[in-house]
Structure formats: C-alpha cells, structure tokens
Image (cartoon, helix red, strand yellow):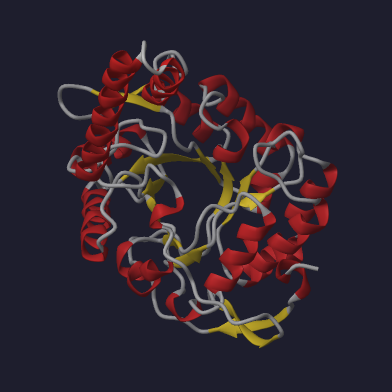
Amino acid sequence: RTQYSACTAMLCLFVGPVGLDNGVGLRPAMGYNTWNDLRCEGVTADAIDAIAVAMVELGLAKLGYAYLNVDDCWATATDPSGELVADPAAFPDGLPALVESVHARGLRFGLYGDRGWKTCAFRPGSGGLEPAHAAQFARWGVDYLKYDSCWASNDHDAAFEQYGAMRDALNASGRPVLYSLCGWNAWYAPRGAELANSWRIAADCDEWANVYVAVRTNEALGQHAAPGGFNDPDMLLGSDPTAPAHLTPRQVQAQFSLWAVMAAPLLIGSRLRSMPASDLATYSNPEVIAINQDALGRQGEVVWSNCPPYAPRDNWWNSPWSMPREVAVAWTSVLVTAAMLSATSALLLRRRAPRTARLLLRLAAC
C-alpha cells in the first residue's frame, strides 16, 4: 500500500483566532465550482443555468450549498475603461443576466479572477485594476470571488500586497463578497485571516495523491482558522468517471469527512448534472455537514498519527504558467530566439546534412 492509504490519523477540534471582519464567511463556504466539471470549453450561460437548476432539484441548496462559482474562462478581454468583458458567445445576454437568474433560484453567484496580468487559462487578469474590477463585480451582484495566483510574483510580500489590494477594493465596493484567496501555498495561512475569508494551502486536488498532500499540509495550520477565515485545501472531487478529475466512491467519502473535520470549504468540483447516487448521499449527510458548519469554526487537529513526517512544499512552479509577466516575456524571447537560430541553421545545413536540418526544423516548429 502507498503512504496515501496506509497512514491514518485521529483529529480533534482546535480553537483558532478571529478571521477577516467583512461580514461574510463566518462558516466554511458550501457550494459548487465549475472547473472540474466544465473546464474552459463548457463555461456557458446555458450550462451554468442548468447547474443552478440541478443544485435546487437535488436538494443541495436546502442543505446549505449556496454558492454557484464560475471558475476561469468566462472573460475574454478588458474594455477601454479597464473593465472585464465576458465572452459574448458563451454569455450572449451578459453576465448580469446570468447572475440574476442564479439569484432567482435562491443561490449565490461566484466568479473567478487572478492577481496576475493573466489568469491561469491566459484570460485577462486583475493586477493593477483591482478597484475597477471589484466595482464591476459589485455592480453585477457577485457574492464570491475566487482570486487566483497565476502569472504573478512569488515574492511573499508582493503576493500579500496584491491580495490586499483586491481585499480593499472589494471592501470599498459596498457589497459583501466572500473573498477566496487561491495561492496554493501554506505560507499564506499565517497572514490569511487579514487578507481573505479563505486561502488555498496546497496544489489542486485533482487526484488522490494530491488529496493526501493537502491534508498533510493542512494538519499543521489549524491555529490560523476561525470564523471569517478558513484554510482551503481545494475542491471536493466526485466519482463520476467522465469528469476531468475524479476519485473512487470510498475516496469521495474519505475526502468529504476529512474536509468536514478540517473546517474546510465544501465546494463540489465534479459533474453535478450526472452525479452518482453515492456522491449525492455523501454530500447530503447532515451529520457530517453539521461538523463542518459548527458556529465555533474550529479546525480539526491531529492527536495521533502513524503517517511519516511531512514538510509542505512550495507550489509556485506547480504550473509552468505561474510566473510574473517579466519572466514570461523573457522566457518567450529566449524561445523565439532559439527557434530562429534552429531555422537558420537548418537552412544552412539542408544540403550537407539533410537529416540534421530536418531535426532542427522540427525543433524550431516546437
């Protein structure tokens, strides 16, 4: 057996500090996120409206799953005033109409942004445009903002400053917005409560091995969580095999139980409209939900474990696009120069060494 399944741990509740005082996020958020369901190509108004219907019809909304969060790929550009432009093909009636439809079903609407100059899917970011974008989100009626960390500096102070800039802009907007910091690193936790209502502490949970990493990382961070601000080990994975990322049904149960004890956000990241009955039963367990939603907001603490020692890792290079603009520009310049050199060399060698020339042309094409 691997260490992911062989080690076990017992947890008790830990008393933490007071979190960010913006009036929301006093308990871990509950809801749904589009990423492990729709990815980029599936993000449309029709799909999201259908998911809103499913959240109500499946009984999830009554259980407290209130947030329907649209992840990356909804925006295509910024207009001359700096505001974000929603994809006109995916949202022909505009984002405000979709927000209104989701609200009409008794749900809250969440949206995605990024502190860098681009999002992880290379859509427009919010770096330097925080006041304009926060005001735009408030005007649209957005209730939740997931704020990512792609194409941005890994310097800790710079990251804190950029996340603080959007925090301040949201607070100045006049609308209470649950602010979810998505920096994928444990070093956000000591400062998390002053920055946001939740903060990602590990890489994406897209397989069981990464669920293990998130749990092991979070087991040392309980003292930083409390009402108003919680450690976020990422979304819940379902067992639908057609989803981009999925677990087995037993792993779904284990993850849900661990997330509940850790006072983590319960955001379903799976195919909601084709959810297996076993997943729905897991996510509908009222006793497990009650542990997660306890008003004291205490995170579970490990009191016994046979797991090996674990040290959290820095996840900045978890994704190759996670770099600041100046690094991206420099790296692109190097690649372009290398391609030009390969193409030139291929032309010079095409007669004397045709096989080498073909190889260099292939490298240039890459």
Q: Which residue is at a point 50% across and 56% down the rendered structure image?
A: 203
Can residue 150 be seen in this snapshot? yes
Q: Is residue 277 left or right of residue 170?
A: right
Q: Residue at x 25, y 36 (%)?
A: 334
Q: Residue 14 at what x, y percent from top left?
A: 55, 84
Q: Is residue 138 or residue 324 the one in the foreground? A: 324
Does residue 230 appear to the left or right of 119 in the view shown?
right
Residue 321 at x, y percent in the picture: 38, 42
249 with respect to 314 (left or right): right
Residue 201 locus on image (x, y percent) = 46, 64
Above/below status of 249 relative to 219: above
283 vs 190, nearest the viewer = 190
Residue 189, given in percent of the width and then of the height, sits at 40, 70
Q: Quadrant of the N terminus?
A: bottom right
Residue extending farthest to the bottom is: 303
Query: In screen coordinates, is 142 left or right of 208?
Result: left
In this view, 323 is above or below 105: below
Q: Which residue is at a point 71% across and 66% down the rendered structure image?
A: 257
Q: In this orientation, which residue lies closer to the viewer: 82 or 351?
A: 351
